[in-house]
Amino acid sequence: MNNYLGHMEPIIKSQGGFIDKYIGDAIMALFAGTADSAVLAGIEMQKELANFNRELMAEEKSPIEIGIGINTGTLILGTLGSRGRLETSVISDAVNVAERIEELTKEYECRLLISDSTYKLLIKPERFEVRFIGRTAIRGKEQEIGLWEVYNGDPDELRYAKLAIAKHYNEAIVLYNEGAYQKALGLFQRCLLNLPHDKPIQKYIESCQKLLSKEFS
């Protein structure tokens, strides 16, 4: 565990972030600069994970996977506790949302997810390879939030496959949001041929089929 954390900490610092705390095997990091810095750190962490996994496999150990969730908002950083114990901590709804997004990386099987609020604040969005995942309910929030996957840090084969279907995927998202579910379904199924195990595409196909069955029932 300490070896893994030793790989990740320098990346966070190099992008102007700092580690607030370790929560078991999780890292909670804060970035006071741009949204770009936080996302770049997430990408580099995924790339460094590949190096770390090569070390593990050389020692005949199983590789690991991590999910990263990023959200942008205001927070209060200060000292909490009593006379017997004090610690620096963060109080913020934005931090809670980031934690929920990290949990969703498992559901969507995406390595790096960011919120709408982070995506909209990117200074140079063109440097990132992103796709819209959808709007989803977040525990503790009344309104749904938009989720985007950043896949610059994916293994090359997976990354190239996502780039290859990006045009059709984005067209399918537009059609889906316009309510043209039959056309969207056809494009999503076409995308699935290139990415047969892609969870977001599978979810959209299931949603299209359910919505179409209601239309014709």
Image (cartoon, helix red, strand yellow):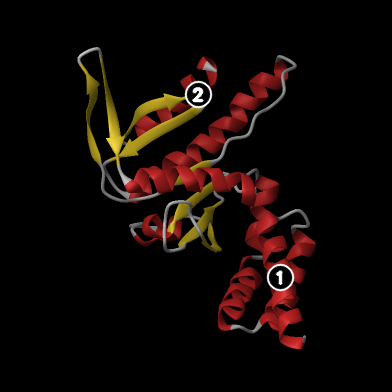
- Name which residue type carries label 2: Gly
Label at residue 39: none
Q: Which residue is mark 1?
A: 188
Pointer 1 local density, CA inside 10 Å: few below 14, some 14–19, many at least 20:
many
Quarter where residue 164 is shown: bottom right
Query: Split into 4 quadrants, where in the image is the N terminus?
Result: top right
Label at residue 24: 2
Percent across and percent down for residue 124 are: 37, 57
Q: Residue at x 47, y 19 (%)?
A: 6
Q: In this picture, is 113 found above or below 32?
A: below
Q: Residue at x 71, y 70 (%)?
A: 188
Quarter where residue 143 is shown: bottom left
Q: Is residue 38 left or right of residue 81?
A: right
Query: Split into 4 quadrants, where in the image is the C terminus?
Result: bottom right
Q: Residue at x 63, y 60 (%)?
A: 163
Q: Is residue 113 left or right of residue 35?
A: right
